[in-house]
Every structure is written in structure tokens, then in C-alpha cells.
Image (spheres, rainbow, N blue to C red):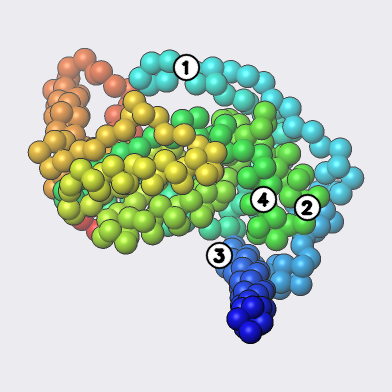
Amino acid sequence: MISQHFIAVSGSDIFQWAWKLMLLVFVIYIIRVLLDLRALKHAGNRKTARRVARGQGLDMAELARRLDIAERDLELFKPVYRSATIPKRRGGTRKLRIPDPPTRAMQRRILHRLLKRLQAHPAACGFEPGKSIVDNALPHVCQRVVIKLDVVDFFTNTTAPRVQRYFQWVGWNRPAAEWLAMATTDEGGLPQGAPTSPRLSNLVNFYMDVQLSKFAARRKGEYTRYADDITFSFPKDYPRRVRGVIQFARRILRSKGYELNGRKLRALRRHQQQRVTGLVVNDTANLPRRTRRWLRAVEHRRRTGGQPTLSDDQLAGWQALRHMINTQRTG
């Protein structure tokens, strides 16, 4: 009697668990479809969204049409690069991979005809039209703590497989996505020197920015990213929160193939000078006081006939930066 009752209950439980498992699998499938549709909605292409919903994708013929190039020429295209090194501002060197003229022309075509139509996350401020270091700094004004993180080898660690997955995510079928990844990556990642790399670094990291910005928002904080410079800020400060932010960011970044630069981790409090992309944000976004004084001295030397320390173009650049900061800060 007892064993029969146990068997009956166990059979019922197994049926319920099997039903729940099937339901879970179905829900996961629906969520993945919705994420694909959301991605394509953010790309601004409803026709492509309908194709993905039907399990299709944009093919090589469509890619050739959009790039205004013969499909045969796409198949024959192979990118060519040369290596170069430039000094970093704070020591060391940076390796560049410079595309040859035909490669650069193809990448510019991809940039203007495909990538510029897609949208990056609002928190991505670097390399985005209409955005600047001021947009990256303003959200962090008057915060109790500013946490600055730096990503190691950001471009080269934005890998070719992730680039390909992104192109598939926005509607291209596998052959077209593979071709686009081949045309825009080198040595397994985004090459510094290619015109497509800055834009792709933002597009590919759309959902990384979603995860990090949601994490900050749930804690009433702010998040922005300017290329490889990541900034969080919060109106309240306690050590456990700072550690939690760094640990969470490290985990998310590692899931995307990145690593944090431990030497550049900073947690800046109100009693310190809080700088974000070169601007001081303790009370308002502005150039550092020393830089403002230096610029006024340069202008005074010019007016009084002294020996100029900057060329006309250099001085105009600094004045334009100051004007942009003042305009956006008060606008």
C-alpha cells in the first residue's frame, strides 16, 4: 500500500517536473526571440526583424546591394594591413594595424552604409556622433564617490567571434556575418587603425553597457563608458559598495573576454579631485584649475606680444574645448 502510494506520487511529480521543464525551455526560447527582435528594433529595421522572427537572415546578395558592390568582388576581398607603433601619452607604445587604401575604402563603406544606422547604448560616449568627453563627465558631477576602471587592450580583445555574433544578432545570416567580421577584424580582434573599429567597439558592447548601467541604476548611481574608460558614480559611499562594483564589473567584463587594468583602478571621494575623461566633476564639469590658469596665461602672452608656446591650431583647439565645456555645462 505504502509503496504503491509512493510510486503514484512519484509518477505525478515526474510528470509535473517534465511539464515545468518544457515550459521553461519554451520561455527561454521566447526570451531569445524577443531579445533578437529588440536588437533589431534598436537597429531601426523592422523588415529585418520580421525575417529573423521567421528564422531567416540577410544574405550576401543583400550585403552586396547595400554596399553597392558586386557580390563577386565581396567574395574576392581580402583585407591587408601594415603594423605601426605610436608612443602613448603616459609612456610605452601602442600598436596600430593600418589598413591599405582598398581595405580602408571597404571599411569606410561598411561604416557609412551599415554601422552608422545602428544605435549604441546611451552610456557609450566615445566615438559617438554628437557626444564628447563632457557628455561622459556630466552624469558624475557632485557624487560622493567616483569609481574609474580601465579595460586592458580594449580593441584587440573585442574578438572576431563577438563581432560575427553581433552581425548575426542584427539580422545577417551566417555567411554575411562571417564576411563582415573578416572585413573588420585582424589577428582575432578589432584593429586599432581601422575606421570601423571605434563604432564596432560600441555596437558589439551594447548589452555589456546594458548590464553595467542597470547595475548602477539599481543603486541610484550613474554609469558611462568612453572607449576603454569605464566610470561609475554614486551619491552614497561605503567600502563594501566600491568593492561590489569592481567585482561585478570584473565579472561582466570577463564574460565578454576583457580584463580590468588593476593599476588604473580608482575610487575618488569628495575630498579628492574627481576627474572623469580629464574633467573635474566635484562641483561642476570643468577643466582642472591648473589647466585653466595655463590657458589664460597662454592667451595673455599672445595678447601682449610674448613668445607663443602653442601654434594657432593648438590654441584654437584648447579654446574650442573650453567653449564646448562651458556650453554643455550651462545648456
Residue pointed to by mark 4: 165
Estimate the x, y position of residue 60 in percent, counting from the top left: 82, 53
Q: Residue at x 24, y 38 (%)?
A: 267
Residue pointed to by mark 3: 42
Residue pointed to by mark 2: 174
State if disc 4 and disc 3 touch (CB < 8 Å): no
Q: Quarter-wise, where is residue 5 in the image?
A: bottom right
Estimate the x, y position of residue 113 in percent, counting from the top left: 67, 53
Residue pointed to by mark 1: 93
Give how far apart the Cα atoms at labels 3 and 4 are: 16 Å
Quadrant containing the C terminus is bottom left
- Identify the mark at residue 56; answer none if there is no mark: none
Give how far apart the Cα atoms at labels 3 and 2 are: 20 Å
Tell me, yes or no, if residue 327 can be seen here.
Answer: no
Around disc 4, counting alpha carbons within 10 Å, would you say few (fewer than 14), some (14 to 19), or many (20 or more)?
Answer: some
Of the residues shown, which amino acid type is indicated by label 3? His
Give how far apart the Cα atoms at labels 1 and 4 are: 31 Å
Q: Is residue 107 above or below residue 233?
A: above
Give how far apart the Cα atoms at labels 4 and 2 are: 9 Å
Mark 2, secondary structure of its residue? helix
Left or right: where 222 falls relative to 227: left
Of the residues shown, which amino acid type is indicated by label 2? Arg
Of the residues shown, which amino acid type is indicated by label 1? Thr
Q: Residue at x 55, y 21 (%)?
A: 95
Give how far apart the Cα atoms at labels 1 and 2 are: 37 Å
